[in-house]
Amino acid sequence: MRWLLLLSLLSTSAAADGAPEGYQKAEGCEHALNAYCNQDDVCKICPKTKKYARYDFAAHEAAIAKWRCYCEYTLSEDREQWVNKPTKGNKDYLHYCTRHPQLEKRLQMCKDGTITKDGDEVKEL
């Protein structure tokens, strides 16, 4: 029982500190960015797999982080970063699409309130 109370207090304090939940670099707009990556016409590389928007590196840009849509299986277990682990005969780690300007625009739209945190357009009443 004490552990449950402790866990409850820890989770409450983590949410109460004002930090956005989820992927921190998405500044509270992770769902909007992920929704964009999972649109049929945005990134066709892994059509039956969930994609996540992450600000991370790529095989061809190992020192330059950009916004990209990564197939779920290319990310770490906590889905926070891209895992560059090539295995013999397997190039699955390359399954991502760079969409830097598009995702930056979506992030700004979310922060400005022109789209919701889920990626839906905000309409005037």
Image (tube, rainbow, N blue to C red):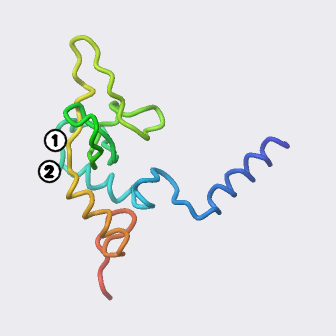
User: How dense is the environment of label 2, judged by Cα within 10 Å: few (below 14), some, or many (20 and up)?
Assistant: few
Q: x and y percent of residue 104 in the render? A: 27, 60
Q: Secondary structure at mark 2?
A: loop
In this view of the protein, which residue sits in the foreground, 39 or 56? 56
The three-letter code of the residue at mark 2 reads Asp
Residue drawn 78% across and 44% down? 4
Q: Is residue 98 left or right of residue 1?
A: left
In this view of the protein, which residue sits in the foreground, 16 or 115? 16
Residue sitting at the far right: 2
Q: CA distance from mark 2 to mark 1?
A: 7 Å
Q: How many numbered badges does the structure rendering display?
A: 2
Residue drawn 21% across and 38% down? 47
Q: Is residue 16 left or right of residue 6?
A: left
Q: Secondary structure at mark 1?
A: loop
Q: x and y percent of residue 65 in the render? A: 30, 44
Q: Is residue 83 left or right of residue 15?
A: left
Identify the residue position indicated by label 2 in the image: 41
Residue drawn 14% across and 50% down? 41
Identify the residue position indicated by label 1 in the image: 44
Q: Is residue 50 left or right of residue 77?
A: left
Is residue 20 depicted above or below 83 in this figure? below
User: In which image quadrant can residue 59 be found?
Assistant: top left
| Cβ atoms under marks 2 and 1 closer than 8 Å | yes
The three-letter code of the residue at mark 1 reads Lys
Residue drawn 40% across and 61% down? 29
Is residue 74 depicted above or below 28 in this figure? above
Q: x and y percent of residue 10 in the render? A: 71, 50
Residue sitting at the far bottom: 125
Q: Quadrant of the C terminus?
A: bottom left
